[in-house]
């Protein structure tokens, strides 16, 4: 329990530090949201200056940071210039959409990667292994960009799946079953792209972990004692592999909000990705900060989750903690 | 000095050196050298034998270039390592050979005082005997003073002139070999000497019984 | 030794690719910016070995594309004349490595035919030539950004690991901060926040600076670990006993241990950073027209009609994949070598 408390405090400190870093980065921008307006000869520079003052963009950095923090405590997390609404209301929907997509893809990827990795690790060096290594190398090299473009190509060519967006027009008029089917159809291309993109790295990690464990002396001695293949794998090898795999899982969870930028923008999935691109281009400062901070929160939570799970699962760590 | 002492004093050649300033320490380095127990960790596995031996000379800038290598080869011969092994990496050597390497490195700067920290533990008995002989030869050749740290009382009994016994971090008894081992005063020393006697008598009994 | 052979094979492949890209002007048959408005979206020129009469030619030849009279953006081969493939032809002027002017190209065909090994884009520009010169930008960006990350990482990680205590603590906290931020978002955010309309050179430098600086944290952690464990070895203590200075220790004992990891990291980071540049350029945040870069070349695929009808526009993706594969193989081989030497 004390450990959880310590790690949470650590996480909060990280969050504060990250938010400061964020603001520092954003201060690099020589311009602001209203710069585009400068191009319009009808808007006088004094109007622009007044707008900037109104939104507090001309105040020094610490003051801006302070008011952002206060806004965060109020639950608003700043204000979007483009959408004229609080950042929070803007993000809630987008976060939901992104999470929907990425959770599905991550679960799928893990469900495939772990059994596949374990199976391949128990046949090292054979042709299954070679095929796996080759296929994963290929998938990794064909980056997410190419994968999603390729999938769209096939979707359009075969007219099988709708491309773009999350819902067809007239969505609201569909029956519940039709709605579910429509959503699923729209989900397939982006989810498949994300899954295919993260799968190879996961499979490699799982395989590497397990190969290392299967080579250790304690597995050797278990095998010498005549422990059967399946029992060896499930009761001896996997628990030992839990440690690095849990850390990996923590990273996966942490990346739920930040891994889908490309796929979302290209397929038009209304998540955080397109919003980030749009706000960065238009210098909608607080939206960008809000998105970055939201992803950071997830990353910190992911690490925290992994830490807690590690302590719960690994008896050695528990002993270390008790010894402190 | 590698570590700062917590308490007490260290005297060398009539001077206290425990809190010496850096200049004093620098001057002392060549005179006092250390041979570790763990030869594998004490020698950089990627270095060749010649590089290891030449390192102190290089650092202290005693020699350079070709002369450096010559000196390294000389030292290798002196400790009984074949000079044509000079380019082999240290991890290719056996335990006893690595210890020879470490000794060669230690005497490179021609020290007066050599600390051997459990340098003979971890070696099998025949290798121990060889290294011991080497150490004794070197001692007479270069008039070295040794400080041997060991848990092997029989070894200590064989070669030490003076003995100090430590127990729980403190020196509990010290004196000449005859004094400490012949008539031990402290309880701990007595236990140690007693355990050696037990082993020795068992050994002699086994020999006597088998010899018949 | 298997590992050594693998490294050699992968490195050879990679070096060939890099040479082809470096000498893009020579290897490419056409000037990348020249437009052929008569041939928008022409498919790749087909190489033939057997002519109409059924004779086999050792030297391949091509037919010229002519637009189909009744269709739009469709071509057919005009079989009236065969144009054999020539080597070391004289063609458009270019500069080798930007310095030496030359007109020699590795291969080409006589006028008026043109050889479009990877088809053309909407302006009729030869994609093959554009891919090669675009590669110069994208790959160079990846390599330079990797250098920045690794140098920063080694400096900070090395200092942290060697001098330890509070320097180490604060450096690692700082690194943790960088590792917790979503780097792709930060990359986009920072790039977009900086001025969008800069000269090509400035944009290029900006890109590699941003990509490289954000990624210092992971290498720094790795280097710090190595430096820390090296520092605690007995042979370093022995060296100190001989009076070695910190500089000597770093130079002779500590830093050589980092070389293996640095090489593996470099081989892993370069394709990642090339991809980062490609992604940025894809969304218009990198180098803009007319400077070709793989991301910019792929950007036309965002239009569905291009994506579906003109499959050869995927070619830059193939180039990207090949480069990534090459670096990955090298990284794997290094990793194997590292594992086997440390055990």
Image (tube, grey):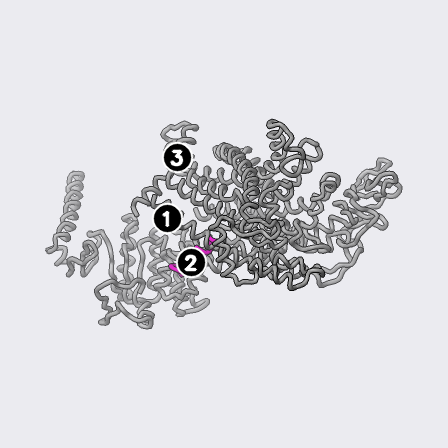
Question: Which chain does the residue under circle 3 lie in?
Answer: A
**Callout 1–callout 2 Cβ contact below 8 Å:** no
- The 10 Å Cα crowd at callout 2, few under 14, some 14 to 19, many 20 or more, is few
Start-end of magenta stretch: C161-177
Q: CA distance from mark 1 to mark 3?
A: 38 Å
Residue placed most toward the observer, B166 or A318: A318
Residue under label 1, please give it. Answer: A6
Q: To which chain does the residue with label 2 belong? A: C
B138 lies left or right of A279 = left
User: Which corner quadrant holds the N terminus of chain A?
Assistant: top left
Residue at the spot of label 3 = A220
Going 66% across and 63% down the picture, which residue do you hit? A45
As helix, strand or loop, the secondary structure at mark 2 comes to helix
Q: Which residue is mark 2?
A: C170
State if disc 2 and disc 3 touch (CB < 8 Å).
Answer: no
Image position of C69 with respect to A9: above or below = above
Whether A200 is among the magenta residues is no
Helix, strand or loop under label 1: helix
The structure residue drawn at horizontal position 56% and vertical position 62%, both measured from the top left corner, is A58
C-alpha gap between disc 1 and disc 2: 18 Å
Residue C48 in picture, x, y percent from top left: 80, 40
Where does the image place residue A271, in percent across and percent down from the top left?
59, 42
- The label nearer to you, 1 versus 3, is 1
Mark 3, Cα crowd under 10 Å, few <14 / some 14-19 / many 20+, is some
Q: Indicate the secondary structure of the residue bearing disc 3.
A: helix
Q: Which chain is mark 1 on?
A: A
Viewer-closest of A78 and C4: A78
Q: Is residue C171 magenta?
A: yes
């Amino acid at each position: 329990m004390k450990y959880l408390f310590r790690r949470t405090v650590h996480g909060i400190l990280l969050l504060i530090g990250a938010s400061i870093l964020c603001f520092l980065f954003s201060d690099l921008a020589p311009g602001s949201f209203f710069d585009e307006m400068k191009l319009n000869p009808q808007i006088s520079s004094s109007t622009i200056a007044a707008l900037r003052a109104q939104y507090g963009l001309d105040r020094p950095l610490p003051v801006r940071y302070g008011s952002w923090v206060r806004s965060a405590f109020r639950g608003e997390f700043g204000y979007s210039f483009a959408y004229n609404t609080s950042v929070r209301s803007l993000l809630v929907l987008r976060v939901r959409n992104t999470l929907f997509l990425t959770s599905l893809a991550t679960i799928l990827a893990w469900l495939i990667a772990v059994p596949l990795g374990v199976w391949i690790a128990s046949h090292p060096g054979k042709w299954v292994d070679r095929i796996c290594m080759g296929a994963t190398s290929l998938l990794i090299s064909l980056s997410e960009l190419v994968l999603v473009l390729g999938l769209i190509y096939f979707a359009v060519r075969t007219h099988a799946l709708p491309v773009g967006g999350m819902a067809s027009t007239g969505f609201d008029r569909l029956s519940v079953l039709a709605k579910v089917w429509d959503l699923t159809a729209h989900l397939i291309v982006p989810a498949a792209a994300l899954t295919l993109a993260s799968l190879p790295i996961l499979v490699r990690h799982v395989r590497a972990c397990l190969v290392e464990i299967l080579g250790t002396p304690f597995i050797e001695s278990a095998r010498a004692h005549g422990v059967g293949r399946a029992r060896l794998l499930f009761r001896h090898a996997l628990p030992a592999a839990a440690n690095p795999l849990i850390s990996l899982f923590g990273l996966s969870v942490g990346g739920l909000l930040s891994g889908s930028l490309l796929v979302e923008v290209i397929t038009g999935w209304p998540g955080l990705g397109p919003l980030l691109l749009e706000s960065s281009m238009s210098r909608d400062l607080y939206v960008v900060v809000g998105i970055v901070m939201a992803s950071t929160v997830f990353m910190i939570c992911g690490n925290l989750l992994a830490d807690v799970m590690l302590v719960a699962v690994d008896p050695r760590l528990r002993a270390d903690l008790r010894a402190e | 000095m590698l570590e700062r002492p917590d308490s007490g004093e260290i005297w060398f050649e009539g001077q206290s050196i425990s809190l010496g300033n850096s200049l004093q320490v620098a001057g002392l380095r060549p005179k006092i050298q250390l041979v570790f127990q763990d030869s594998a960790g004490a020698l950089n596995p990627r270095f060749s034998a010649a590089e290891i031996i030449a390192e102190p000379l290089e650092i202290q800038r005693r020699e350079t270039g070709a002369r450096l290598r010559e000196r390294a080869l000389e030292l290798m011969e002196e400790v009984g390592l074949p000079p044509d092994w000079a380019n082999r990496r240290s991890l290719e050597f056996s335990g006893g050979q690595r210890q020879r390497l470490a000794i060669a490195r230690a005497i490179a700067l021609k020290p007066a005082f050599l600390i051997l920290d459990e340098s003979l533990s971890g070696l099998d008995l025949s290798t121990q005997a060889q290294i011991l002989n080497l150490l004794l030869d070197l001692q007479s050749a270069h008039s070295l003073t040794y400080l041997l740290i060991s848990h092997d009382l029989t070894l200590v009994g064989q070669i030490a002139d003076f003995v100090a016994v430590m127990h729980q971090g403190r020196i509990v008894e010290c004196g000449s070999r005859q004094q400490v081992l012949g008539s031990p005063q402290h309880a701990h020393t007595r236990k140690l000497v007693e355990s050696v006697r037990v082993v020795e008598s068992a050994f002699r009994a086994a020999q006597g019984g088998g010899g018949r | 030794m298997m590992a050594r052979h693998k490294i050699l094979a992968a490195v050879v492949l990679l070096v060939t690719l890099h040479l082809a890209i470096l000498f893009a002007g020579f290897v490419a048959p056409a000037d990348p910016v020249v437009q052929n408005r008569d041939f928008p979206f022409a498919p790749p020129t087909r190489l033939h070995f057997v002519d109409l009469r059924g004779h086999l030619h050792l030297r391949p030849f091509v037919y010229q594309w002519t637009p189909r009279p009744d269709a739009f953006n469709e071509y057919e081969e005009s079989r009236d004349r065969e144009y054999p493939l020539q080597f070391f032809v004289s063609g458009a002027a270019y500069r080798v490595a930007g310095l030496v002017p030359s007109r020699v190209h590795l291969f080409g065909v006589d006028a008026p035919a043109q050889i479009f090994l990877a088809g053309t884009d909407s302006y009729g520009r030869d994609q093959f030539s554009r891919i090669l010169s675009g590669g110069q930008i994208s790959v160079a960006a990846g390599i330079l950004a990797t250098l920045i990350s690794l140098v920063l990482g080694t400096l900070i990680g090395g200092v942290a690991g060697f001098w330890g205590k509070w320097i180490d603590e604060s450096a690692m906290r700082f690194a943790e901060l960088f590792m917790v931020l979503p780097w792709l978002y930060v990359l986009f955010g920072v790039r977009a926040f900086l001025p969008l309309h800069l000269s090509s050179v400035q944009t290029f430098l900006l890109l590699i600076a941003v990509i490289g600086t954000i990624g210092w944290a992971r290498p720094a952690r790795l280097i710090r670990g190595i430096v820390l464990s090296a520092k605690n070895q007995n042979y370093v203590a022995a060296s100190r006993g001989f009076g070695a200075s910190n500089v000597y220790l770093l130079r002779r004992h500590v830093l050589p241990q980092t070389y293996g990891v640095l090489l593996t990291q470099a081989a892993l980071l370069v394709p990642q950073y090339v991809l980062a540049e490609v992604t940025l350029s894809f969304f218009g945040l990198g180098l803009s027209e007319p400077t070709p870069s793989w991301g910019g070349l792929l950007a036309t695929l965002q239009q569905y009609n291009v994506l579906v009808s003109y499959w050869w526009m995927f070619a830059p993706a193939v180039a990207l994949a090949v480069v990534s594969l090459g670096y990955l193989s090298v990284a794997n081989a290094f990793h194997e070598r590292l594992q086997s030497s440390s055990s």
